[in-house]
Amino acid sequence: MGVKVVQQQQFPLDGAVQKKELRMNSAELRKHNTLEARPMVAIRGKLYDLTDFVDRHPGGRDIMLLSAGRDVTQVYETYHDMARTEKILRKYHVGTLTDSALPTFPEPSPFQTTLRTRISEHFRRTGHDPKFHPLHLIHYAVVIGAIVGSYYAQFFVPVVRDSLALSTIAALVLGLFCAQSCFTIVHDASHASFSHKPWLWTAFGAWHDFMNGASHVAWFYQHVLGHHPYTNLPNADPDVATSDKHFRRIRPHQKWFMPYLHQHLYAPIAYSFYGLKSRWDDVSNIYLTQSRGAIAINPLQPHQHAIFWAGKAFFLLHRIVLPALFCVSLRRTLWLFFWADVATSLTLALVFQANHVVEHVAWPHPDKDTNIVPVDWMEMQIETAQDYGHDHFLTTKFTGALNYQVVHHAFPNICQWWYTDIAPIVKQTCKEYNVTYHLRDTFYEAIKDHIDLLWVLGRDTQSTGCATAGVVDAASASPGYINGAMKEE
């Protein structure tokens, strides 16, 4: 179908004259995903041509071009003060989006408006910069120091290098702190939540490519444009993508197979290979399928291609090739690489699963006819997440404050160091508006919730139907969920 053009006056500003308005569907919008193709986005059903704004965007051109060619309503509303940016948006309005490829949401509710206002007032009152905390630099330094130190010890400290046990311990430490770098440096970069400088976000993101061997661009599509806008939504959130023949069963509508009886045992073991799978998915998603599940991936810019392949090469060189050539045997090198990668993968996977893939959080479903999720987006963010260990400083630092996942999903653009300060505001507002805030006392309890989910759905052979539209908790989705007790605050 071609692009339809109609005459319509839009956003009259200072005597603006009539202009042509475009009408596009989602497939047509997808073609406008590069600077050469005139990058466009849709927000609340309106089309915006970003061609003349890309290089003027305060958040940098990379984010604009990564996001082009799609509906970015939830991302835009999360990262911008809508009242302040509306006038700027009007200048670039060019038409209307006629459909929605992915689920959409109602206008912000009083709950969302109140919560955003209270958080903004908190930072105005305290004078704190929501994107900076000086102590966070110390956290970065500790993580980087531990990575460099444990890597050096494996191959250049004789007492460690010559001992299989000590070098393996050093490899495990390296893996654990590589996971910490994902929770801090990489995660902060993807959400632009630390500093106000786009070049720094690019540099932090490149850490993922060079030090972890995984593409930050691929992570951005999976996490920022996929998981956060569409949390726990079937066929939208890449983090909970499933199929009838999947290695695990985490949704009642998935067809049951005999191996699921033991998924609570084998799935955590499979999580150990998360890193290896992610590195392959980078190549497959970016260069073969151009998508991460339902999330389309735009053509990379030249510097992104360079970072991608240089990162892969450097990772292989410093983790396998150079140690095997100059430090220890190839067998020892592969042994140490394996255990470091297991530590990284298992840490990341378990933290992610404990936050969302548990018995009692919400699993939303859009209306099958309109593709609209009939609940406020902010409310959905809070009810699809689980917090734990609020009183444990080490848990907070070990997880990059993802034990405040509810707060993070509500305000991903705020530096994680401030989560402990704003969590009481979020809790109080949830209480006033009767929005469920899931909180466990410890990380162990949160992990147990995930294992319980695997156990229950591994034995539930009956429920294979889909839930109705709305935010649905596990208890309403499957009879087996009745024991998913939760703590609300």
Image (cartoon, rainbow, N blue to C red):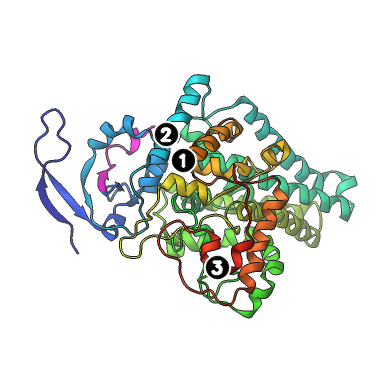
Mark 2–mark 1 distance (CA, rounded to whole Å): 10 Å
Dot 3 and dot 1 residues touching (CB under 8 Å): no
Question: Residue 348, percent across and down?
Answer: 65, 52
Residue beneath disc 1? 433
476, 274: nearer the viewer = 476
* Mark 3 or mark 1: whose residue is earlier in sequence: 1
Residue under the image location 63 percent in, 29 percent down: 137
Q: 10 Å neighbourhood of mark 1: few (<14), some, or many (≥20)? A: few
Q: What stretch is highlighted in magenta?
A: 46-61
- Element under disc 2: helix
Q: Please indicate, yes or no, whether residue 61 appears anywhere in the rendered image.
A: no
Would residue 55 be counted in the magenta stretch? yes
| Mark closer to the observer (2, 1) | 1
Q: Mark 3 points at which residue?
A: 478
Q: Which amino acid does label 2 sit on?
A: Thr
- Give the Cα distance between marks 3 and 1: 27 Å
Give the side of residue 411 with respect to residue 137, left or right.
left
| Residue at which label 2 appears | 114
The spot of residue 330 in percent (x, y) is 77, 61
- The amino acid marked with disc number 3 is Ser
Residue at point 29% right, 52% down?
A: 32
Of 365 and 61, which appears nearest the observer?
A: 365
Residues packed near mark 2 inside 10 Å, few (<14), some (14 to 19) or many (20 plus): some
In depth, the one of 441 and 226 nearer the eye is 441
Q: In this view, does 462 lie above or below 148?
A: below
Pointer 2 with pointer 1, Cβ within 8 A: yes
Disc number at residue 119? none
Q: How far apart are marks 2 and 3 (CA)?
A: 34 Å
